[in-house]
Every structure is written in structure tokens, then in C-alpha cells.
Amino acid sequence: MMEEEELELAEDLEAILHLTPEVQLAIEQVFPSQDPLDRADFNAVEYINTLFPTEQSLASIDDVVNKIRLKIRRLDDDIRTVVRGQTNVGQDGRQVKEITRDIKQLDHAKRHLTTSITTLNHLHMLAGGVDSLEAMTRKRQYSDVANLLQGVVNVLEHFQKYMGIPQIRQLSERVKAAQSELGTQILADFEEAFPSQGSKRTGGPSNVLRDACLVANVLDPRIKQEIIKKFIRQHLSEYLVLFQENQDVAWLDKIDRRYAWIKRQLVDYEEKYGRMFPEEWCMTERIAVEFCHITKVELAKVMRTRAKEIEVKLLLFAIQRTTNFEGLLAKRFTGCTLTDIPGQQKRAESPLDQTNPFLEDEPGEDVGAEKDEDLAKPRKPKAPDNPFHGIISKCFEPHLYVYIESQDKNLGELIDRFVADFRAQGPPKAGTEEGGAVLPSCADLFVYYKKCMVQCSQLSTGEPMIALSTIFQKFLREYAWKILSGNLPKSSSNSGGLTITSLLKEKEGYEAAKFTVDELCLICSILSTAEYCLATTQQLEEKLKEKVDKVLMERINLTGEMDTFSTVISNSIQLLVQDLDAACDPALSAMSKMPWQSVEHVGDQSPYVTSIIMHIKQNVPIIRDNLASTRKYFTQFLISSFIPKFINHLFRCKPISMVGAEQLLLDTHSLKTVLLDLPSIGSQVLRKAPASYTKIVVKGMTRAEMILKVVMAPHEPPVVFVDNYIKLLADGNPETFQKILDMKGLKRSEQSSMLELFRQRLPTPPSGADSGPSLSFSAPTPEQESSRIRKLEKLIKKRL
């Protein structure tokens, strides 16, 4: 029983005395021991095996047990001693706590004593300072007052919580009374030195006033503002008299005198009064800013009174001189006084030196007189760099309609001059440098636009810019109509004007008038000019949006004018296509009238093919040499018009024999080869045709070849013929199939059964698809050709 109890006790102790590794490490550091019983990882079995390694050693078991029991008793004695020693700890702790409380009381007493001594010292300083302040105020000893007043105010702040004490409250009221008396006294001193009545200054700078300004820095901010206001008003009183509205020098033509006067005044102020006012007051800048405000009001008043006398040259002169002056202000001052915030520290002005722009002559450059740059180059606006921008010149905005009207008139005269010059000089001639090039008038127009835009942006970035952009739109349209569209050659069949329908109109035996080489050169020149105008108008729109205020950017829109130039490009290309049609129509008509049924053998290419190729070799190099980037659009229009026309005439060749179909197939291949070589015909440099161009030619001419191969195929048995047609042409239009049958010369009775079989053999369209017959490249009607031309016009606008 005893052994079991000891075992349970050991297990309980082991559970209770399980210590964390950190605690165990701390114990080992405080009480280092080599005894295995003190180890955290003690193992009883290993310990016993160590004590009794052999059976013979068990004979000494009683001695070992006695030693362990003795060690246990010693440990119990040590523990008992430690526990008894802790009985007096609580009493000792209470004694220590009483000592600590006494120390705290002494600390509080010391702190209160220090506070009392400090407060008494502050009170002594405050009482003495108030007496000294009142005495110095009466004697106007502002230099001493400036140093003393700030100290008195700072000391008084320590007594804010003691204002309930009558003596402290009385001292506070005396300080306030002294401050009020100082403010009144300083204002009176400045009034005496600089009287507001009359323009003559009887006083001048003095050390007393300089020290008074230092005192004003400590007083209520309203005192400082009143001093500044009265001094500036008195300093500018002469200006109001000299430049009254009824004076001759008040008008715009003598605006230079205003700015010359203020420059002299500012230099005079720096010399006489620069040291009187503290630098952080920025008095020089304040005088200049107040002058600007007065000038803005006075100019607005005089311009309203004499609005009918304002001419554009006079207005631009006044604006130019004013913006120059605003630029000088930006060089000299920081603009820190433009937005005064109470309590905000101002950056001191730099002292007047040799770099002062008011000692320099004004630049004589006119507004906008700068080197012409590309409209595409970004130009940072001046307004954000100059805090004084518009401080005076804003008054001219209500009268900028004079400038806008002047530009409207000037641009109208410019367009009329362009028209007259074009008529006098005549159109560009082929073989000259002007042939096919952009018209010089186009560059002149946009250079003038740029000059106007720069001028107006310096005058205003608001509504006047919107008005100017409207004027730009008006004369861009006039240029497109009068200079470009108005000078496009008119064919004899289209004297009433150029339309898409007339370009696609075909009449049997009719031959439209062809353009001369000079006329082709003129068309190319107008086309190139329209393309240049289109690109430059887009740049102009972007620059206008950069110049105008952000809230007005959405009102700048030149899309309509860009569309107008796109229309000129489209019409020019159509005229070039018309010239091709005019040359090819006789040859194609001859092709459709030939007796193809009676052709007995296949020879070289037919005469009509030779005629078409000859025209292409004559005119295409001329057009290519006079066109640059627009050449690709011309070739697309050319092919999209010529190939459908060729297929349409091909259907008119009926009836056709087997040999006749072979001859036509040879002719078609010859035309296809020439069309693929079109980009390099007549050129010493071999150029690879664009992929899109090659694709159009191959697709269109391959269809013509497939038509002829179907005609060459025997129509018996009918099922094989119909399936072969569907396979080669992939065209489900019965009208196209009907034309094929006509070309083969089948009778109507045979055609009826063949058409019925064709409808039966057509593949069933997939579910959801259109149930009507599919059209792949059937011979287009004039309406279809017109629709295709309109789609290509949209393609041009998109690409440009």
C-alpha cells in the first residue's frame, strides 16, 4: 500500500512540476547543478540502472535508499526554512509602500513649489511688462515695444486659467487696452506721414514707422491690413488722377504710359520705402497687384464708353503690351499675394537688383510673332506658368468679337485671293513640279490658321476660342468647295455635276469624253491637297482642344469638315475611274458585239484587249506619278469598277462557241496579267502589288474565267452540267444561271427544264440562314455598283 501511494504521489508531482523550457533554462542558470535528479529529462529507470549496474551491486541497496531518504529530509528542511522566511514579506512591503508615499508627497510639494515660483515670476514679469508697455507706448518707443509686446502676450497665455482672479483679469485688460492704443496710434502715425487726402506725399520713411510695422506684426492682423491698404491707396492716388477716363492718355493707344508709370513708381518705392516695411509683407508685389486690379477696372470702363472706336489693330496692340507687362510681373514676383490666407507665411521678395525687369525696356514683339512650327508639335500653354496671366488682360475678352470679326473678314478675303490666283495662274501642268502636288494655297491657309490660333489662345482660352474654331470650320468648307471641288474637271456627260449614278451609267455605243493629261494632273493635285487638308484638319482639332479650357473641349469638333475633304477625295478618285471607263467602254462594247459563235480558231489576244491595255499603259503611269499615298485607294476603286463592268459585258457575248469561249478565256487571262502588273507598269522600279489589291484582281478575274469554263462545258447530261456550274461558281442566283444558258445559245424550252433542275440541285441552306438564293459575285446592276461604291467611300474615310 505504501509503495502504491508513493507511486501515485510521484505521478502527481510530475504532473504538477512540469515546467516550460524557458523556466527550466532560467532555473539552470540561477542554480547550476550536475545532479541527474535536477535534469528536466530525468529518467528514473536510467537513474536506477546507473546506481545498480550489476546484480552484485544490489547488495548495497539499503545504503542507497538511506542516502536518498537523507537527501529528501534535507530538501524538506530547506523548503520549510524558505516558507517561514516569507512570513515577514507582507510587513516589509507595507513599510516600503509608506516610504514611497512619503517620497511622492515630497515630489508633489516640490512640483507645486516650482510652479508657484514660476507663476510668481511670470506675474512679476507680466506686471512689470504691462507698466513698461504703457510707458513705451506713450513715448512711441516702437522698437522696444515690438520686442516687449510679444513677450507680454506669451506670458499672458500662461494665466488663461487664472482669469477668474481679479488682479490677473485686470492685467489682461490693461494688455488689451495697450494693444488697442498701439493700433490706433500707429495708424495715426501713418496717416500723418502719408495723408490720404490729395496726391502729394508730405511724409516719408522713418525709423519710427519701420519699428511701428514690426509692432503691427504682433497686433491684430487688421491693423497690418489697414496700414497696407492706406499706403497702397495713397501710393496709387496719383495714377487715378493722371489716367482718368476723360484723359487722352487713358485710351488704348497710350496704354504703354500706364505701365511705364507703374514701373517708375515701383523703382521709386524700392529706393525710398523698401526698408520701411518688413520683407514678408511683399509690399512691392502688393502695389503691383493693386495697380493691375485698378487698371483692369479702368480699362473696362473706358472700353465700354468708347466701344465703337475699338479697332482690331488697336485692340491687339493693347493686348500685346498688357500681356508683356504680365510677363514682367511673373519674372519679378512670385504671386504669393494673389491669394492671401490669414496666418500664412509669405515668401519674402528678392531685393531689387540689376535683373529687375522694370528697369528693362519692354520687348517689341507682337503677339503671336514666333517661329512657325508644325501643328502636330505639342506646345505647352503659357497661362499655368504665369500666375499674373489675365490679371489685366481679362478685361479685353468682352471686346474680342472685334478680333473674331476681323479674322472672319481676313479669311474671306484670303479664300477669294486663292480663287483669283488659281484662275489667273491656271491649274497645275503635267510634267512640272506643281503637277500632282499639294496646292500652295492649302499650306498658306493652315499657316494663317496657326497664327490666329496662337494669337487667340494668348488673348483668351474661353468662348473666343470657340468662336474662332467656328470661323475655321466655315472657311475649311469654303476652301473644299471653292478651291477643290469647284475646280475638278467636268465631263461632257456630267455638266450638271458629278454623281455616282452618272459615273456608272452605260449606254450602248456611247463614248464619254476622256480627260486630258493636264486634267488628270489637276485631279491628282486636288486629291493630294484634300488628303493633306484631311490630315491637317485632324491635327488642327487636337491643337484647338489643347488651347481651349477643359470645360469647352467637347465643343471643338471638326468632323464635318474632315468628312467634306473625304468627299473630295472620293469624287476625285471617281473621276479617275470614269476616265478608265471612258477608254474601256468602246473596247468592251466591241467585245460584246463580236460573233463569238463563228470563231474558228484561237489566236493571239483580241484587238479590244490590246486597246484596253494600251490605255492602261498610257494613263496609269501619269496617275501613279502624280499620286503618293492615295494610289492604293485609286487602284481599289479602279478594280472594283472595271472587273464588274468586264463581267457584265462578258454576259452580253452570246451565243459563244467552244472556240470562242477559249479565245475569251485567253483574253481574260491577258487582262488579269496586266491588272496584276498595274503597280509597276511604265516604271523603272518593279513594285510588288499590295496583297489586298492582288486579292481583288485574282478573285474578280478568276470568276470571269470560271464563267467561261462553265460555258465551254457540254450541257449534256444536264445534271452533270448543273452540278459543275454550282461547284465552279458557287452562285445560287437563277438570273446568273440564266445568263450562262443564254451564252451557250440554248433554246427557251431547254432553258426552262435546265432552270428547274438547277433549283432542285441547289444545296439546302443551313438552319437559321436566309432562305433566299445566295449571291457570290453575280454581275451587278447599276444600283448594286452604286452601293458598292458607297461602301468603298466609307472605307476611305475609315482608313484616312
Image: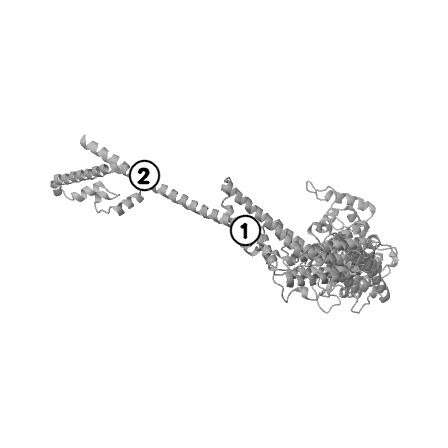
Among the 4 quarters of the image, the one containing residue 693: bottom right
Q: Nearer the viewer, residue 220 or 743?
A: 220
Using a 10 Å C-alpha cutoff, classify the residue at mark 2 as few (fewer than 14 neighbours), some (14 to 19) or many (20 or more). Answer: few
Residue extending farthest to the top is: 1
Closest to the camera, between mark 1 and mark 2, is 1
Q: Residue at x 63, y 54 (%)?
A: 189
Q: Which mark is residue 133?
A: 1
Q: Which mark is residue 98?
A: 2
Q: Amino acid at mark 1?
A: Leu
Mark 1 Cα shell of 10 Å, populated few (<14), some (14-19), many (≥20) = many
Marks 1 and 2, how far apart in space? 51 Å
Secondary-structure class at tag 2: helix
Rendered-image quadrant of the N terminus: top left
Q: Position of residue 13 (x, y in %)?
A: 25, 36
Which percent across, then down, holds residue 592?
Answer: 83, 56
Residue 634, given in percent of the width and then of the height, sits at: 76, 59
Q: Report the colour scheme.
A: one colour
Image quadrant containing the C terminus: bottom right
Image: 520 above or below 134: below
Residue 408 percent location from the top left of the image: 81, 57
